Image (cartoon, rainbow, N blue to C red):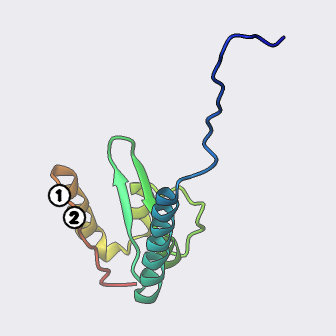
Amino acid sequence: MFSSEPSISGAFGITGISLKQKNAERALREGKEDLARAQKVANIGSWNYEPASKRTRWSDQMYDIFSLPYTTQVTPDLFRSIVHPDDRDHVDMVFTDALRGPARFFSIWSTAL
């Protein structure tokens, strides 16, 4: 069972997330909370559309502005259907322009709610 030969034994383990990673996660969480708070106060929402996957992400405030449940799967067609008819041509133009080239940010202001 025991050998008379010399040997080296050891153990190595990772016991948890590094302090640097914890701090980065906390900063990210706090940044998201700050953004959500600012959007709520200003009554502004943000969204992202990925054409390749046709995936749309909305901030909670976007759902609040349009009185939709947070679980609603938003598509471009759904969004267009809830935009005021007087604003649809403008929304279509902005959306089409954004799909043609690199658009980092654009806004759509409603003329009628």
Which of the two residues, 47 or 36, is positioned nearer the viewer here?
A: 36
Q: Give how far across and how far down residue 80 sits, in percent.
A: 38, 63
Closest to the observer, 6 or 38: 6
Residue type beneath disc 1:
Asp
Distance between the Cα atoms at labels 1 and 2?
Answer: 5 Å
Q: Quadrant of residue 82?
A: bottom left
**Residue 63 image point, x, y percent:** 51, 71
Q: Position of residue 81 (x, y in %)?
A: 42, 64
Which residue is denoted by mark 1 in the rendering?
A: 97
Give coordinates of residue 22: x percent, y percent.
52, 60
Disc 1, SS: helix
Asked where in the image residue 76 lies, by quadrant, the reply is bottom left
Q: Which mark is residue 36?
A: none
Tell me the quarter of the picture where residue 93 sits: bottom left
Type of residue at label 2? Val
Residue that appears at 39% across and 80% down? 44
The residue that disc 2 covers is 94
Kindly check if marks 1 and 2 are in contact, taking CB atoms under 8 A apart as contact. yes
Quadrant where the C terminus is found in the figure: bottom left
Residue situated in front as seen by the camera: 9 or 18 = 9
Name the residue located 45 percent from the left edge and 69 percent from the top edge: 27
